[in-house]
Image (cartoon, rainbow, N blue to C red):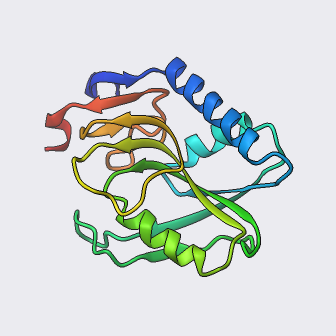
Amino acid sequence: MNHDIERILYSEVQIAEAVKKLGEQITRDYTGKTPVLLCILKGSSVFHADLMRAIDLPVEADFLIAKSYGMSSQSSGKLKILKEPEIDIKNRDIIIVEDILDTAVTLSALLHTLSLREPASLKTAVFLDKNLGIKKPVSADYKCFDAENEFLVGYGLDYAERYRNLPYVGVLRREIYN
């Protein structure tokens, strides 16, 4: 797998430091509360697990699968929730944990949908905020890294369900996905 990577963008050490720092910030912001970390599957699962361990508070975990792409590579703009959270989020402090924020179409629709369920608060924590040079409908409340518009894999990010288990984030060689 490593031979498919053009270059490493964020090392395992850099990731651990960034997640630790983000966990400390969330700990300060949510002191006295029990936030629910709502993981958007599948790509966010690695970040979600590490972030939970970096927060020095009681937290609850839940999972959600949401899509806005359907069978195309372009977002339809219509949100489809394939797996609902099991926790009732009404009057709860919710942090949506997402792997990568690119166009933010799915996240924007998800924020709107979840806000209708009347959480006490609704924030977002993203691992990577991708610079696409476009105005996004929402921005991350918490993030680890900014990233350029490249095809990134590792640390939960995949291409065709592969590379999620890499301990770093790397740029996938173009000939792999072209």
Q: Residue 84: x, y in percent?
A: 60, 74
Q: State left or right for residue 150 relative to residue 136.
A: left
Between 47 and 90, the one nearer to me in the picture: 90
x and y percentages locating residue 138 in the rendered image: 41, 60
Instruction: Please state, as top left, top right, bottom left or bottom right, where the C terminus lies in the image.
Output: top left
**Residue 153, quarter of picture:** top left
Q: Residue at x 59, y 32 (%)?
A: 19
**Residue 40 vertical position relative to residue 100 in the rendered view, above or below:** below
Eyeballing the image, is 103 above or below 120?
Answer: above
- Image check: 129 left or right of 18? left
Rendered residue at 23%/63% (across/down) = 73
* Residue 60 x, y percent position in the rendering: 77, 55
* Name of the residue lying farthest toward the bottom: 116
x, y percent for residue 150: 24, 38
Q: Residue at x 67, y 61 (%)?
A: 94
On screen, 35 above or below 149?
Answer: below
Tell me if 168 is positioned left or right of 5 in this view. Answer: right
Q: Quadrant of the N terminus?
A: top left
Is residue 13 shown above or below 23? above
Q: How many marks?
A: 0
Question: Where, by quadrant of the figure, is residue 6 drawn?
Answer: top left
Locate residue 40 relative to residue 7 in the image: left or right: right
Residue in front for this viewpoint, 161 or 45: 45
Between residues 85 and 108, which one lies in front from this camera angle?
Answer: 108
